[in-house]
Image (cartoon, rainbow, N blue to C red):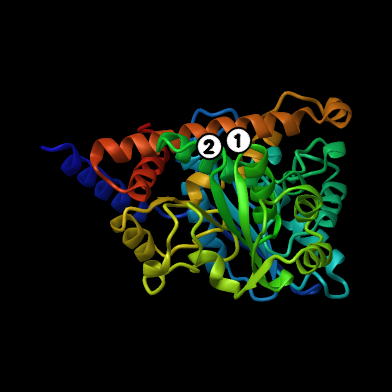
Amino acid sequence: MSTATGFLRELHELQARFESLEPELWLTVRDPELGVEGYVVVWTTLNANGGPLGRVGKGGTRITPTVTIDEIGRLARTQSLKNAAAGLQLGGAKSGLCADPRAAGFEEKYRRFVRLVAPLLRENGGPWGGLGYDLGGDPLHCLWACDELSSTTCFTGKTVEMGGTDYDTEGIAGLGVAVAGATLLNHRGEGIGGTAAAVQGLGAMGAAVARYYTQLGGIVTTLSDPRIGGTWRLKEPLCGALLDDVTVMDFMAIKEHLDRDGHEQLSLDAVLYGEEPLLFPCAVQDVIDTHNVPRIHAKYVVEGANNPCTAAARVALHERGIDVIPDFIANPGGAIAAYVELTSSVSNEENARTAAKVDEAKLTTRTMVADNVMQVLELSASAEASPTDSATLLAMRRVFGKA
């Protein structure tokens, strides 16, 4: 049997096995008097067996008026692959609250939700690693949850003062994506020094990617976000005051710089079709599909957003010779930081003084992401397979304890 044939057989067998998995926990909690409805789904904790946390799953908490348990289930399933692909001994889970976080009375609803799901928490003997950030999340929620349960281990993404890594502010997920790009370039013999990149989306992910990619020695020459009026091709690489404003997501100041300094303004999606060798799509899902793949000029696509390329687009890009590092390999920095919060031996008091968990999370993210990208690329070369299929096989192996 050829290496390629064996690769495909193993991939298909493990995919079928993963598809057959049922969630380990699928729970709805309600308080009709307060109008509270929330969900916790732990999909699988197989890869957490024997780990420092035991059979525990982790993921963020989504808060929207329309969220459903089916949506949370799909997210938990994806999180299982992401956590396994990252090399974490941590299963996949998600939680959700069906509410408008901007509505009057939300704090009371949120606190009641936290109280209702508390028995599921790892610290109470349950299989769930705790609350965190997702759509609708706000730093206030962390304060409310920790206050309600008199515990700081029930929530990840906390401030440094509370013993956390503050991973959104620190941009740890974006750090991982930038490292993934640098690792890919180095493996392909190009090196990051002076290699131009385009960044789509300047939210927490894209802003951090621009910041860290620049710090690593790369250059960012195109930015795009609807809040700055579309795509901007920069006259000179991103640096100085403009980079500072991007880092803190000061969109008004960014727009003032761009208007004043004479950079070239283009349509919002023009960022996808530039001449930069490296493209970081960090905005929303499905921005690259089979219809616009022929217009992509980049040699490398490193996914910062979740599923910015459709599955078919990933195949089509590979067929054109364009390397794609999928989201679940490139952007698990938030999950890694959460894992550090749950496992670090650094005390909350020491962390408040030194931010040691932040340093630990950044180092762990750099190391894990770089190692995983290298493993994906080496597997891809040996099996003559796409990086996406190689990443999927790597994740599946880890889910089932085969890697």
Q: CA distance from mark 1 to mark 2?
A: 6 Å
Q: Is residue 270 left or right of residue 100?
A: left
Residue matched to label 1: 365
Viewer-side residue, 321 vs 354: 321
Residue drawn at (56%, 65%) of the image = 271
What is the secondary structure assignment of the residue under circle 1?
Answer: helix
Q: Locate residue 102: give its quadrant.
A: bottom right
Q: Residue at x 62, y 37 (%)?
A: 217
Q: Is residue 268 left or right of residue 158?
A: left
Which x, y percent locates residue 147? 88, 48
Report the front residue among 229 and 83: 229
Q: Quadrant of the C terminus?
A: top left
Rendered image: mark on residue 369: 2
Can residue 302 be seen here? Answer: no
Q: Marks 1 and 2: CB-CB under 8 Å?
A: yes
Quick one: 235 or 390, which is closer to the camera? 235
**Which kind of residue does numbered mark 2 sit on?**
Val
- Kindly identify which numbered label has been placed on residue 135: none
Left or right of residue 128, residue 248 in this image: right
- The amino acid on which the numbered mark 1 sits, given as a three-letter code, is Thr
The residue at the point 55 percent across, 70 percent down is: 270
Question: Could one spot residue 104 in this view of the protein?
Answer: yes
- Quadrant location of the N terminus? top left
Kind of element beneath mark 2: helix
Q: Residue 226, relative to residue 73: is it above or below?
A: below
> In the rendered view, would you say 3 is above or below 131?
above
Residue 294 place in picture, x, y as percent: 36, 68
Write down the quadrant of residue 394 in the picture.
top left
